[in-house]
Amino acid sequence: MENALAYARVSTKEQAEKGLSIPAQLKAISEYASHGFRILEEYVNEGESAGLQIDTVKVGNS
């Protein structure tokens, strides 16, 4: 089993409303990872990023 990190990012409200929300991305990543990957940590980057510095937040271990 390979180690992996999960990274989910939404940069606009519209993305979140079109099924690309952080929870939806993390679910998809987790489902993909179940085929031979072990997610060691999840990282989330939320908010509008048009020209702004956005901090990435570690959300915990899986």
Image (tube, rainbow, N blue to C red):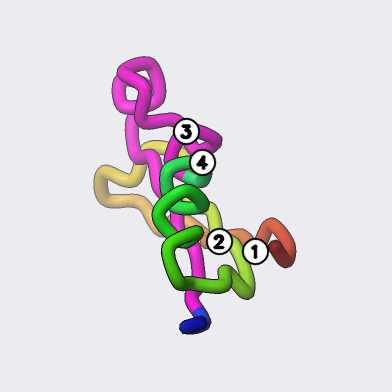
Disc on res. 37 = none
Q: From mark 3 to mark 1, how far is it between C-alphas? A: 17 Å
Task: Quickly name the residue at label 3.
Answer: 24
Dot 1: element:
strand
Horizontal arrangement in the rendering, residue 50 relative to residue 46 (left or right): left
Q: Tell me, yes or no, whether the two marked residues, 1 and 2, touch with CB atoms within 8 Å.
A: yes
Q: Nearer the viewer, mark 3 or mark 1?
A: 3
For marks 2 and 4 on the same chain, the one whose residue lies earlier in the sequence = 4
Assess whether mark 3 and mark 4 are in contact (beta carbons under 8 angstroms): yes
Task: Say if 39 sits above or below 48 in the image.
Answer: below
Q: Earlier in the sequence, mark 1 or mark 4?
A: 4
Residue at 55% of width from left, 61% of height from top? Answer: 43
Secondary structure type for disc 2: strand
Q: Earlier in the sequence, mark 1 or mark 2?
A: 2
Q: Which residue is mark 1?
A: 58
Residue underneath mark 4: 27
How far apart in space, not on screen, are marks 1 and 2 (Cα)? 4 Å
- Three-letter amino acid code at the position of disc 2: Tyr
Instruction: Estimate the x, y position of residue 7 in percent, counting from the top left.
Output: 45, 60
Q: Is residue 24 magenta?
A: yes
Q: Which mark is residue 43?
A: 2
Work out whether residue 46 or residue 20 is closer to the camera in this orientation and state it.
Answer: 20
| Sequence-first disc among 3 and 1 | 3
Highlighted magenta segment, given as a residue range: 4-25
Q: Is 20 situated left or right of 62 in this image?
A: left
Question: What secondary structure is found at the residue carrying circle 3?
Answer: helix
